[in-house]
Amino acid sequence: MIPTSLPAQQPSAILHRPFNWRLLAAFGSGILMGLAPAPTHLWCLAWVALTPLWVLVVGDKRSTNLLPSLVYALVWGIGYHGLALSWITGLHPLTWMGVPWLASIGIALACWVIVTLWGAGITVTWAAAAHGLWAMGNRQSRSPLDRSPALRILIGTALWCAVEAFWSQGILYWTSLSYTQSPSNLAILHLGQLSGESAVTAAIVLVNGCLAEAWIALKLKHHSPQARNLLLIAGVSLVSLHLIGFGLYQQPRIDAPESSLKVGIIQGNVPTRIKLFQVGQQLANDRYTAGYHKLVDQGVEAVLTPEGALPWLWVGQANQSQNPLYQAIRSRGVLAWVGTVGVRQARITQNAIHP
C-alpha cells in the first residue's frame, strides 16, 4: 500500500472562514445600530449593537495585530453610518439644477460614500486607540487593563466620547451614537442636560461595554461569576440612566411659568427639487401661511419657520406686501420669525426676519 499524505492546510485558509464570520458580525451589528434612529425608531437596538464590535476589538487581548480590529471597525462604521445617512441619497434627482440623470445618481452616491466613510472614521479611530492601549497593557506584567474589565469599560467609554468630541469640530459630523436615541427615547435624551450629547453617547457605550466584557468573561469558564456581575451592572446602569433621564424630563425648565413663551414651529417640507421654481414657491406660501393661521388659532405667542422657508430675496415694501404670509402676519398680529434669503455686504445669505 502506497502511503499518502494530505496537504497541510495553510494558516491563512484556517483563519479565512472565521474572519469572514467576524466581518459579517461586525457589519450586521453596524446595520442594527443604523436601524436605531428615525425613520425606524428602533432606539433600543443601540444598547446592544455596539457589543459585537467591542468583543471583536477587545476580546482577543493576546493579539498584537492591529489590522483586523481596524477592518472590523471600518465594516461596522460603514453599516451604521451608511444606513443612518442613507437619507442623503435624496439629493437625487438633481435634474432641476440642469444635472443629467446619470450624473445626478453619481453625485448622490459619491456624497453618500464620502459622509459614510467620514463617519466610520470615528469607529476606526476608537478601535485603533483601544487596541493600542490593550496591547500596551498586555506587554506589562499584571497590567491593570488586563485584569480589570471595569477599567477597560471606563477607558473605552472615555475614548469613544473623546473621538466624537474631536469629530464634532468638523462640518460632516452627523451620526453620533446619541443620534440613535432621537427623537423617540426622551428619557435618555434628557441626560444631555448634564453634559450635552456626550452624556447620551457615554451611556450607550457604557452599557454595551458591560455586555461585551460579560461575553468575553463568559468565554473564559473560570470567569462566570465575573460575567454575571457585569451583566448585573449593565442592567442596573441601563435602568438607572433611564430613571435619571426621566427625572430630568419631569423637571420644569422654567421656574416662573408667567415668563415662558409659547412658540409654534412650522415645517413646510417643500422638496428641494421644486422649491426654487414657481410651483415650489406657491407651495411654500400656501403651507407656511396655513401653518401660521393654525398655530395662531392654537394660541401661540410667536411662530418660527426653518432656514430658507421662503427661498427668495425679501427686498422692498412692495414685495413684502404681496406675500400672503406677510399679509397673514400683519392681519393676525402674532410675531413670526421667517427664514428667507437676504443680501449682506453684497453677498446672498440665509436670513431670519420678523415682518
Image (cartoon, rainbow, N blue to C red):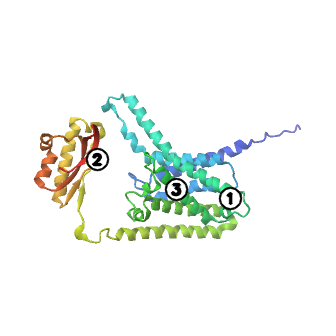
Q: Nearer the viewer, residue 231 or 262?
A: 262
Are the two marked residues, 3 and 1, in contact with CB atoms closer than 8 angstroms?
A: no
Are the two marked residues, 2 and 1, in contact with CB atoms closer than 8 angstroms?
A: no
Q: Position of residue 223 (x, y in %)?
A: 67, 67
Tag shown at residue 162? 3
Instruction: Kindly identify the amino acid type of the residue bearing the numbered disc 1.
Output: Gly
Q: Image height check: is 114 above or below 141?
A: above
Tag shown at residue 307? 2
Judged from the image, the secondary structure of the residue bearing numbered disc 1 is helix
Q: Can residue 49 be spotted in the picture?
A: no
Residue at point 62% right, 56% down? 58
Are the two marked residues, 2 and 3, in contact with CB atoms closer than 8 angstroms?
A: no
Instruction: Kindly identify the amino acid type of the residue bearing the numbered disc 3.
Output: Ala
Q: What residue is shown with label 1?
A: 137
Judged from the image, the secondary structure of the residue bearing numbered disc 2 is loop
* Mark 3 to mark 1 CA distance (whole Å): 20 Å
Image side of residue 184 versus residue 327, left or right = right
Image side of residue 247 versus residue 228, left or right = left
Q: Can residue 347 be spotted in the picture?
A: yes
Q: Position of residue 293 (x, y in %)?
A: 16, 53
Q: Image height check: is 311 above or below 234?
A: above
Q: Earlier in the sequence, mark 3 or mark 1?
A: 1
Residue at point 52% right, 46% down? 121
Q: Earlier in the sequence, mark 2 or mark 1?
A: 1
* Mark 2 to mark 3 CA distance (whole Å): 31 Å
* Extreme residue toward the right, this view: 1
* Mark 2 to mark 1 CA distance (whole Å): 50 Å
Q: Nearer the viewer, residue 248 or 83?
A: 248
Q: Earlier in the sequence, mark 2 or mark 3?
A: 3
Q: Nearer the viewer, residue 159 or 63?
A: 159
Q: Position of residue 249 (x, y in %)?
A: 36, 67
